[in-house]
Image (tube, rainbow, N blue to C red):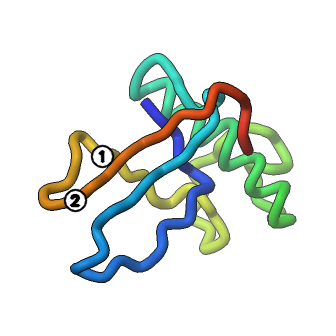
Amino acid sequence: MLDLHDFKMPKLKEEDCNRNFIAGANKLVKDLNAGLDRVRFVAAQMNNIKYGSDLACNISGICKECRSDLRNCNITSIIHKKPVDSDFHVIIIGEELGF
């Protein structure tokens, strides 16, 4: 499981399907549940702090499953295999990068 929570995906054109995702080793977790927990309790929290959000989870440190428009953990994308007709690579750097 690889958490790319803070990754900003550029708009893709149909002919531009070659992508490299670079992430630090700290984004690797043991399974899907650990990855989802990491998104909710680590990455989302850090992004709330980074962007100065006053959400309940940022104050309490616990995800409250809020419905706020400011919530930065609304979308979870899971890529199960390489997309068809794409040159898609994940490169893991052996150090902590980001959060």
- Is 38 in front, or is 2? 2
The residue type indicated by label 1 comes to Ile
At x 63%, y 63%, the residue is 71
Note whether 51 is above or below 36 in the view shown: below
Residue 38 pos. (x, y %)? 59, 33
Secondary structure state at the residue bearing disc 2: loop
Q: Classify residue 66 as left or right of residue 82.
A: right
**Label for residue 1?**
none
Residue 76 pos. (x, y %)? 43, 52
In which quadrant will I find the N terminus? top left
Secondary structure state at the residue bearing disc 1: loop
Residue 88 pos. (x, y %)? 31, 52
Q: Classify residue 93 as left or right of residue 80.
A: right
- Is 98 in front, or is 44? 98
Q: Which residue is mark 2?
A: 86
Q: Nearer the viewer, mark 2 or mark 1?
A: 2
Query: Mark 2 or mark 1, which has the lower sequence index?
Result: 1
Question: Residue 68 falls in which quadrant of the image?
Answer: bottom right
Q: Which residue is mark 1?
A: 79
At x 66%, y 36%, the residue is 41
Q: Classify residue 38 as left or right of residue 21.
A: right
At x 54%, y 27%, the residue is 28
What distance separates the C-alpha of mark 2 from that of mark 1?
Answer: 13 Å
Note whether 59 is above or below 38 in the view shown: below
Q: Classify residue 37 as left or right of residue 82.
A: right
